[in-house]
Amino acid sequence: MHKRNLSKDLSGMRVLQTARKGFFSKILGALSTVWMEKQARLTVTVTIVAALTSFIIFQNVILIHSLGLVAMCNYMFSQVLRMSCFLVQTWVTRAEKTRNQHSVYSFGYQKVSILGNFTASLVVILYSVFGLKQGLEFMLQRDRHIRSSAPVWAFICLLQYGLVQWHISKIPIRDFFGGLFIQNSRKRVDGIYNHLQRNDMRAKLGIAAVAIVTSIALLAVTNNSALTLFDLYGGFAMILMTFLGNTPVLLQNAMLLLQAAPAEITTRLEKSLREVSTFEGVLEFHKEHFWALSPDEMAGSLHVRVRRDADEQAVLAQVTNKLANLIPARNLTVQIIKDDWIISATPRRL
């Protein structure tokens, strides 16, 4: 009995070791794939440097009681996550090429990059909530005083900002803001988010952050009495802009993960399907389902019932061509179903 239990434990350990090896081997394989790209290698270096410096700066600006510098760390952390999403997108692009070479059919690769952007925007929003909580604590401190080392850390923040922004301007980051889906889903978002989707606030946040941090450094150097108040309000403004700038991205990627279709695209699809029902031999269509794989790519499936004497290939070609302007043929599944009704030639007596 003891030997049986021992053999079960050993077999369980082997399974766990195999799973761990498989997981780590996949991670290493993905890293090696990304490392093959010259642009990605530099991005990995800048991302690691920016992440380490952001962590060090954050630990120190908390101690000097500067909300503006805390908000600046929040913004830089969001930029680090954007570069990380670019690395994920690089891996997805190379993985899709490998998939096409081996003719493997899967929509999973598109979802990986969407999930990465969703997670990044969610983390930034949660980090903004933490910054808001930190600001409220600073506000309740009556004797809050920003330490004299604030200009030094402000200068380091500006150097880090310059390095990161220079690199981001050199790489094609695609975080699905301003794509087809976001343009066609503006009616779903009310109030201020409608304006934010047309104007990416994250670009304006960088300019505002530099202005606020520079002002904090100058006020600290001159020992101005308005430093504490300006730091508090400037920090709150940066945190609010970070929150509002990332919320539309979070909502967009959430809709993509839920396999929703844009409202305007759905209207155009309904119009095209009504025209499909008028094709020769088509009786009806049903079980139609359309969704967005990415902001610029749709997928769908539907069943088309045709007469028994209809040409299936001709109907399939007509339906595919009709929907080709909205859904690529490779992402469209059309099932032709022959009508099984048999009309008797013998008249019935009543």
Image (spheres, rainbow, N blue to C red):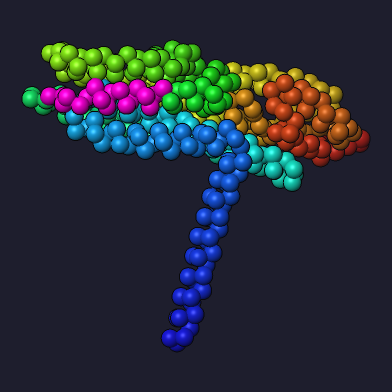
Q: Residue at x 70, y 33 (%)?
A: 331
Q: Position of residue 199 (x, y in %)?
A: 46, 13
**Left or right, residue 301 beside residue 1:** right
Give the extent of the magenta segment.
145-162
The relative height of residue 25 versus residue 174 in the rendered view (above or below) is below
The relative height of residue 78 versus residue 325 in the rendered view (above or below) is below
Do we see residue 254 in this rendering?
no
Q: Nearer the viewer, residue 218 or 168?
A: 218
User: For residue 103, what is the image quadrant?
Assistant: top right
The relative height of residue 15 versus residue 129 in the rendered view (above or below) is below
Q: Nearer the viewer, residue 224 or 277?
A: 224
Q: Position of residue 15 (x, y in %)?
A: 52, 67
Q: Nearer the viewer, residue 254 or 187?
A: 254
Instruction: Tell me if residue 154 is in the magenta stretch.
Output: yes
Instruction: Tell me if residue 70 is in the magenta stretch.
Output: no
Do we see residue 322 in this rendering?
yes
Work out which quarter of the rendered image holds the C terminus and state it.
Answer: top right
Q: Residue at x 50, y 16 (%)?
A: 186
Q: Residue at x 7, y 25 (%)?
A: 143
Spot the residue most to the right. Answer: 345
**Left or right, residue 239 beside residue 250:** left
